[in-house]
Image (cartoon, coloured by chain):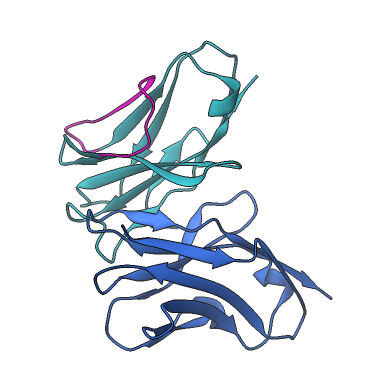
Amino acid sequence: AQSVTQLGSHVSVSEGALVLLRCNYSSSVPPYLFWYVQYPNQGLQLLLKYTSAATLVKGINGFEAEFKKSETSFHLTKPSAHMSDAAEYFCAVITGFQKLVFGTGTRLLVSP
Amino acid sequence: DSGVTQTPKHLITATGQRVTLRCSPRSGDLSVYWYQQSLDQGLQFLIQYYNGEERAKGNILERFSAQQFPDLHSELNLSSLELGDSALYFCASSPREGMGTEAFFGQGTRLTVV
């Protein structure tokens, strides 16, 4: 079964620092992978998605993720954190039944 | 704005009661998916409808049921509510039977059972 594992339930960075949120996937077939963001009291917003085209995927708000098959990873990065990036981030994979399976989420805290 | 509309945004009810959550998918989308987000279970897939028919079931309790109407809106019915049913319930929609690479989520309905 396809699944994703997010390492670290909380990540703290200073404003202007690099953001790195980790996601590893498990899949017997080439996966479709996604990152979603959830701001406080908001719904889920798609940040970016990997659908087997380019391995480096650029998303909204300056985020990007790189698909690395050898490491079964799809880590999310942003060169410089902004206070407005504070939110919960979810990695997700599409299963063979065409449903999104989500990781447990990583809360990003940004300090001034 | 994803185009997926969920009502109500907040709902507070007592244990043992029954509630109905409503979802209007994006215009033209035929599939509707329901997810539950709770602190202990995370984001869990509940059920999917495609063009009025149930297509897949996930971790949905027997006390919960759903349907999709001819106008494609969907309702999730939760009955005999328990404290543990308190959660954020999301609806998502997609154009085709599977989520594929396009799935758009609503803002969610926050259910509090007291």
| Residue extending farthest right | A112
Is B35 drawn above or below residue A80 in the view shown? above
Q: Residue at x 30, y 71 (%)?
A: A31
The colour chain A appears in is: blue
Report the magenta residues as a range.
Answer: B57-72
Choose between B41 and A48: the one closer to the eye: B41
Residue at 51% from the left image edge and 18% from the top image edge: B81
Q: Is residue A100 magenta?
A: no
* Number of disc labels: 0
Where does residue B36 sit, x and y in percent of width and height? 46, 40
Of residue A45 and residue B79, the one placed in the foreground of this image is B79
Which quarter of the picture shows residue A71?
bottom left
| Residue B40 drawn at (x, y percent) | 59, 41
In the image, is A92 to the left or to the right of B31? Answer: right
In the figure, A68 relative to B84: above or below? below
**On the picture, is A86 further left or further right than B99?**
right
Instruction: Specify the colour of chain B.
Output: cyan
